[in-house]
Amino acid sequence: MRRGNWLGTVMTAAVVALAAGCGGASGAPAASAAPTPGASGAIRVTSPAFGDGGTVPRRFTCDGANVSPPLRLSGVPGGAAELVVLAEDPDAASGTFVHWLMWGVDPHETTLGAGVVPKGAVQGRNGFGQRRYGGPCPPAGTPHHYVFSVLAADVRLHLPEDATVDGVRRALAGHTVGSGTLVGRYGRTG
């Protein structure tokens, strides 16, 4: 059941990308510090801290410094007005849990530094009820999956500072022109 939830989240992101008319990302990192966004709807999301499907280092969890991991972005569509960053745990016992919600990220950003909120970006309420990143913190047992999603909007999102993921998803409806995900895993032995 938990694996199905994780797969559902990843499939939802894929459907959003397909609906946005993605044509496939080049997969190559951006060559300059502030490139012009590309034409593809598939955004490549990577991290120098962990690979796709790899283990999220302790530093980026509740057991460490609890700071957001560094992310690298490429293939942002040219029509993007801003980016949304979302980190979710689809394996949580009570349903998908939001660990991070941020919008207003400049679509020309190619890197998000560890623990850094880009100038002009706004952090919404996470599942802990806080307006900040809250790292992986699963109960002891099977490692959970953490889906870091980046979505490109073709309009500026005008949201209240305490917006939740539901409000952001409503604002994105019909305005998502690209998306990408990076999945990490983290478990605790207790």
Image (tube, helix red, strand yellow):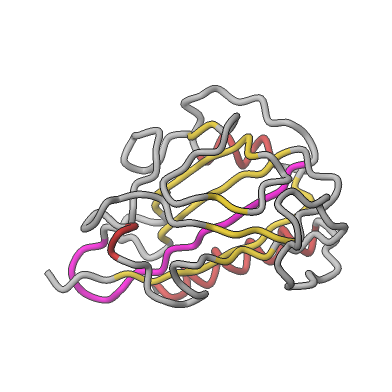
**Which residue is nearer to you in this view: 169 or 67?**
67
Residue drawn at x 77%, y 38% is 81
Q: Quadrant of residue 24?
A: bottom right
Residue furthest to the left:
190
**Which residue is nearer to you in this view: 133 or 50?**
50
Q: Is residue 90 left or right of residue 144?
A: right
Q: Is residue 49 left or right of residue 94?
A: right
Where in the figure is residue 176, as x and y percent of width and height? 75, 47
What type of secondary structure mainly makes up the magenta span?
A: strand
Q: Quadrant of the N terminus?
A: bottom left
Where in the figure is residue 127, as x and y percent of width and height? 36, 43
Q: Which residues are magenta?
A: 138-153
Examine the rendered structure and indicate whether residue 84 appears above or below residue 29.
Answer: above
Residue drawn at x 41%, y 59% is 89
Q: Quadrant of the C terminus?
A: bottom left
Q: How many numbered dots are placed on residues in this image?
A: 0
Q: Quadrant of residue 10?
A: bottom right
Residue drawn at x 57%, y 32% is 119
Q: Quadrant of residue 130?
A: top left
Where in the figure is residue 79, as x and y percent of width and height? 85, 45
**Which residue is nearer to you in this view: 152 or 165?**
152
Where in the figure is residue 110, as x and y percent of width and height? 66, 53
Q: Is residue 143 magenta?
A: yes
Examine the rendered structure and indicate whether residue 160 appears above or below residue 62.
Answer: above
